[in-house]
Image (cartoon, helix red, strand yellow):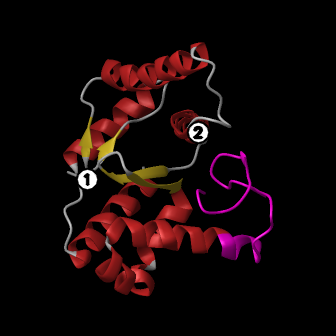
Amino acid sequence: MEWIRKFTVTAKDVASRAGITLEMLYVGKSNPREKVGKNNSIITTEKLSHVLPDLILIWFFWVRLESMWHSKVQHKRTVENDAIMQEIMTMFIFDESDQGWAVISRGSADMAKAKGETILKSFVDFEIWKDGATENGFLPALIDYLHELRIGATGSIPERVVCAECGRPKENLSYI
């Protein structure tokens, strides 16, 4: 809950400074239990973000992702050859983690996603990349900065990389 508080307050502050509208939705875990219900109550009471008001709706969110996965498998798609399966896999990996995480998108075209501490650091560091947000747009600048954070974590750009978010091997860092 502390990470959720810190993230939502920081994200709202960055959105305000960037002059953008930011809508947030807490989607809990794929097996929503008492903790997710408590989080929903606290998030609602403190007006931190939107929530799916019923644990069954949270469960349906995750079941829908799983259904999309199975549909892709039936059509002989794999994580290696299907971008949607890659994104679903990332969501499943985020769900398995005990850390916070965030996916930030504008429509379905561009999407920034990262584990909790990485996405929070990118918002804390907003002053570093705010000129890029003004010039190129908030989401492209955020994606670029997350890319820089990931490169900084390794110190180099190897030819073959493993994605820090999902563990999948990548040929280059353009997608990670």
Q: CA distance from mark 1 to mark 2?
A: 29 Å
Q: Where is residue 100? Give x, y as percent.
A: 50, 50
Taking the spot 35% from the left edge, 30% from the top edge, the residue there is 37
User: How many numbered tags mark residues here?
Assistant: 2
Three-letter residue code for mark 1: Leu
Residue 156 vs 160, above or below: the answer is below
Taking the spot 45% from the left edge, 19% from the top edge, the residue there is 63
Q: Where is residue 15? Give x, y as percent.
A: 26, 69
Q: Earlier in the sequence, mark 1 or mark 2?
A: 1
Q: Where is residue 59? Give x, y as percent.
A: 40, 21
Three-letter residue code for mark 2: Gln
Q: Which mark is residue 67?
A: none
Q: Is residue 26 left or right of residue 63?
A: left
Q: Is residue 120 left or right of residue 134?
A: right
Q: Which residue is mark 1?
A: 48
Taking the spot 63% from the left edge, 19% from the top edge, the residue there is 76
Residue 37 vs 48, above or below: the answer is above
Instruction: Report the span colored magenta.
Output: 151-176
Q: Which residue is mark 2?
A: 86
Q: Where is residue 10? Give x, y as percent.
A: 35, 68
Taking the spot 66% from the left edge, 63% from the top edge, the residue there is 173
Q: Are marks 1 and 2 in contact (CB under 8 Å)?
A: no
Q: Is residue 52 visible?
A: yes
Q: Is residue 80 left or right of residue 18?
A: right
> Circle 2 sits in a helix, a strand or a loop, which is it?
helix
How busy is the neighbourhood of tag 2: few (under 14 within 10 Å), some, or many (20 plus)?
Answer: some
The quarter in which the C terminus is drawn is bottom right
Residue 38 vs 63, above or below: the answer is below
Q: Is residue 4 left or right of residue 89?
A: left
